[in-house]
Amino acid sequence: MEVKRGEIFSRTLSGRCPNCGHFGIFQSWFRLRKQCPECEMELEKEESGFYFGTTSVGYVLAILLVIVPVCILVVMDVLGMWAGIAIAIIGSILLCVLLYPLMLCWVIMLYYIVQAEELPKNRTDTQA
Ligand SMILES: [Zn+2]
């Protein structure tokens, strides 16, 4: 395999194309380009899966990092119930919005680490 799993890991973690390592796979904060501007690897093929996965990761993170701590604070009487609800809602939305590109990278990273042979550069390789 031309692109090792370690490279896929470090490339996607820094928001780069898993195939060639170039920046610019993001069209906007929430959207990937249809393909990498450098190596033209298609990013759209698994797009719906990536976005679905990212939303799921966002829910889990929001529960772990926002909702559970807020519930604990409410139970401990540090926060009032309505203040807790407001913080939980606003905090969850902020967390998902701010971390979205990062979480999208994690999902892409997981996908291509599990299926490293799916990368165009690895596909042409002769199987060992
Ligand atoms: Zn690329």
Image (cartoon, rainbow, N blue to C red):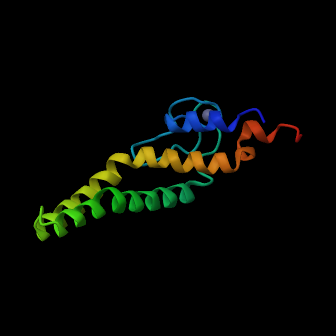
Residue visible at 23% across and 62% down?
A: 70
Q: Compared with residue 114, is residue 124 higher up or lower down, i.e. above or below?
A: above
The part of the image, by quadrant, that contains residue 78 is bottom left
Residue visible at 33% across and 46% down?
A: 98
The part of the image, by quadrant, that contains residue 90 is bottom left
Q: Residue 107 at what x, y percent from top left?
A: 53, 51
The part of the image, by quadrant, that contains residue 116 is top right
Residue visible at 79% across and 42% down?
A: 123
Q: Compared with residue 6, is residue 43 higher up or lower down, i.e. above or below?
A: below
Q: Where does the C terminus fall, quadrant-wise?
A: top right
Q: Residue 29 at what x, y percent from top left?
A: 39, 44
Q: Residue 112 at what x, y percent from top left?
A: 65, 46
Counting labels gives: 0
- Direction from residue 97 to residue 53 in the image, left or right: right
- Direction from residue 29 to residue 92 in the image, left or right: left
Q: Compared with residue 13, is residue 66 higher up or lower down, i.e. above or below?
A: below
The foreground one among 98 and 60 is 60
Residue visible at 19% across and 62% down?
A: 73
